Image (cartoon, grey):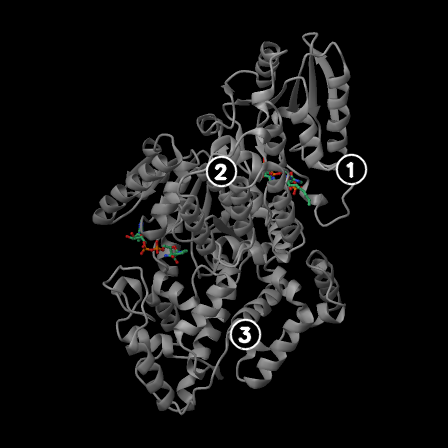
Amino acid sequence: MAQYTRVSGVVGLITLQNPPVNALSAVVRQGIVDKVETALSDPKVKSVVICGQNGNFCGGADIKEFGTKMFGPPLIPMIHSIEAANKPVVAAIEGSALGGGLELALGCHYRIAHSKARLGLPEVTLGLLPAAGGSQRLPRLIGVPAALNLITTGRHVTAAEALQLGIVDQVTDHNTVDAAVKFALSVAGRSLDARRISTYPCPRPSDLDALFEEVMQKVRQSARGAIAPVACVQAVRAAATLPYTQGMEREKELMATLFTSGQARAMQYIFFAQRAVGRWRMPSGASWDTSKPRPVTKAAVIGLGTMGRGIAVALARAGLSVVAVETQEKQLLEAKQAMSSMLERGAKRRGGVPALGLISYSQSIQAAADVDLVIEAVFEDMALKIEVFKQLTAVCKPGTLLCTNTSGLDVDQLASETPNPELVVGMHFFAPAHVMNLLEVVYGPRSSPQAVATAMQLGKKMGKASVAVGNCSGFVGNRMLKLYLEQASFLLEEGATPELVDRALEEFGFPMGVFRMSDLSGLDVGWRVRKAAGLAEPGEASGPSARIRKGYRYSPIGDLVCEQGRFGQKTGRGWYQYEKPGSRVARSDPWMHSFLEQYRARHGLVARSIDHQEVLERCLYSLINEGFRILEDGIAAGPEDIDVIYVFGYGWPRHRGGPMFYASMVGLAKVLERLEHYHQAHPDVPNLQPCSLLRRLVASGSPPVHMWREVRKKLHSQL
Ligand SMILES: CCCCCCCC(=O)CC(=O)SCCNC(=O)CCNC(=O)[C@H](O)C(C)(C)COP(=O)(O)OP(=O)(O)OC[C@H]1O[C@@H](n2cnc3c(N)ncnc32)[C@H](O)[C@@H]1OP(=O)(O)O
Ligand SMILES: NC(=O)C1=CN([C@@H]2O[C@H](COP(=O)(O)OP(=O)(O)OC[C@H]3O[C@@H](n4cnc5c(N)ncnc54)[C@H](O)[C@@H]3O)[C@@H](O)[C@H]2O)C=CC1
């Protein structure tokens, strides 16, 4: 709803009230319409201020209303009537003015923002475009290039940038509503002819066609297959080339296509999933609302290699004091330099001062004596990690949380080697840790809810989508990835090329196909793991037994590629060739094609033609099947957890909503049928066998994603 009061005798103050973000629900829209009418018809009122309750202007349209039957007054006429008012209307922006919230403010004649406010048109991140006039008003106000940037990326801008761009008229450090009322008094009675943005001509850059072509190419490349960014560009083009009314028609037309698209549903699902994972629950029943996190102001990172450096930088950026410990002098020096430049680059990009002073460096673990939490990031070696945890137990103050960044070792085993296993959790970051916005918080049976709550809260503070998961080999993300990689290798054996597999996955929307991605991360990493697990065997054995391990089909192709010293980008050769070691542009490699032919010939394999559909079904459905097994095992609490992990950590296209959501869109019966088909064709690949939760869901009529937890509960109660 909206509240109305008269202040200073002549200013009508309308306050939006819909906690927590004052989203424009039907009731709020009705409230605005009514209160604007009251203010405009009251002869005592000379000007109007619109603000939001509790220091928050407006988070935009109520996303929960999307996909339901819409009631209440529509936004567009509501904003038009504000703009057409004959008394000045001032938006007092505190907190956020996003989406429909900013569009409402753009309909006002003036905008005053608090210095800490954030403004933006993030609709593109929900699969939409700013369709309450935002795509038509913003370019008229700030010019086409700046509007294109904001609308196609959905980024939020600070009040200072908004002032610089011309989105707001004034920025204040004081009470924003007071400042807006004062301002409203000062402009009462003034002509509003020059304040109605919809009447402005849109500034037309001379190189209009080239500009739009360039931006269109950029958005098509950065969000492959996503339709919303393309529609955003088209809508801004309409603003630049058509009169306002026709531009609004185009905006509406484009929005109608997006609004009902599966992509918008998928992206809105991810918006809510990202928030739902914060409401974690452990199998013991402990959960986010009953477990209080411990305060963490000082943390230590042990081991400053690839991961430790990024983790320490991310902690410092979140405002924590960091003790960075590295035993090797040379590594320590290198790390210091690298971390300083990461912080400096970040500060330059985001504005602000690099948090260099927050990090202290040491070669001795003794420096971690007074920290609240430690993140260990030494080599992936259980004996070494046990030794480091022993030293930490002796050095740290009682109650210090001990977290490991292991990517594959057993967190329970590590915990059981310490006198206080309840203080141990996994904090599994993704490389590069100061850039990637995902964190798996891995709990074991003895991890205390408080330790989980603390790690989850710290992850959030570091700006990471943090997901609590159970302990198992590969946790959630890498456990599923293993199946995806396995199928990709089998496809090569059967006749595909790295290029064909990658093209299919990139057309699906991944920023990089599986082979280009592996070349980037380094092929030697997986090779080492396979050797340690007794899977990779040296030499070029032939015959069917060479492709069987522990009774199941195994592809040694990746091991053979590594034996050639081809580790990917870092060696200039991998699944592809690169101009030189470290180069990033992948080029087809004739060596790889003849290697694959020789390999097939040696193993008596006859290459067959493989199409994109098979690549997608085999790679994605096997990964999805493992996702169902993870749900069945209770390693992830719900499909949202898996989807957030895949969208934030593995490049799964957001507009497809994560693997589990995608499966629900494809139809669970179809996923089941295709898995059965492929399992029949490849009976020696047990991972293609559909798991019981998937079967049970299909038997229960393929309920929507949000009901899967219930089906799983029933399945468990019957076991
Ligand atoms: C043909 C039809 C024509 C229709 C034309 C309409 C066109 C439009 O006008 C389209 C739109 O506005 S789309 C909406 C655009 N707005 C956004 O994307 C902002 C979304 N919110 C945020 O970024 C953060 O919540 C924010 C930065 C605001 C606050 O962040 P916090 O970290 O402080 O808080 P959160 O944990 O994110 O949120 C708190 C609770 O509020 C829920 N929520 C947030 N924004 C919402 C919104 N816009 N609608 C509904 N619920 C919303 C959020 O889900 C969370 O609740 P729980 O999920 O229960 O935890
Ligand atoms: N590299 C990656 O992409 C990811 C790695 N991880 C995990 O993170 C951990 C670290 O991996 P990386 O950073 O890649 O390894 P790295 O080899 O780059 O760095 C390890 C660092 O630890 C230092 N170190 C060894 N023993 C130490 C000790 N006792 N005290 C202090 N420092 C010590 C080494 O000198 C080295 O600088 C591993 O457990 C790994 O599995 C997790 C996620 C992703």
Q: Residue at x 64, y 33 (%)?
A: 21
Q: Is residue 262 left or right of residue 42?
A: left
Q: CA distance from mark 2 to mark 3?
A: 38 Å
Q: Which mark is residue 147?
A: 2
Q: Which residue is mark 3?
A: 613
Q: Residue at x 30, y 74 (%)?
A: 589
Which mark is first along the chain, 1 or 2? 1
* Quadrant of the drawing holding the C terminus: bottom right
* Quadrant of the drawing holding the N terminus: top right
Q: Nearer the viewer, residue 655 or 695?
A: 655
Q: Residue at x 60, y 85 (%)?
A: 680
Q: Quadrant of ligand 1?
A: top right
* Residue type, mark 2 in image: Ala
Q: Nearer the viewer, mark 1 or mark 3?
A: 1
Q: Residue at x 68, y 19 (%)?
A: 86
Of all residues shown, which one is farthest toward the top? 9
Q: Nearer the viewer, residue 159 or 698?
A: 159
* Residue type, mark 1 in image: Gly
Question: Height in image: 700 above or below 550?
Answer: above
For label 2, being within 8 Å of ligand 1 is answered no
Helix, strand or loop for disc 2: helix
Q: CA distance from mark 1 to mark 3?
A: 44 Å
Helix, strand or loop for disc 1: loop
Which mark is first along the chain, 3 or 1? 1
Image coords of residue 604 (percent x, y): 40, 92
Q: Nearer the viewer, residue 16 or 186?
A: 186
* Residue type, mark 3 in image: Gln
Image coords of residue 278 (percent x, y): 60, 45
Image coords of residue 91 (percent x, y): 61, 23
Which mark is first along the chain, 3 or 2? 2
Q: Which residue is mark 1?
A: 72
Q: Nearer the viewer, mark 2 or mark 1?
A: 2
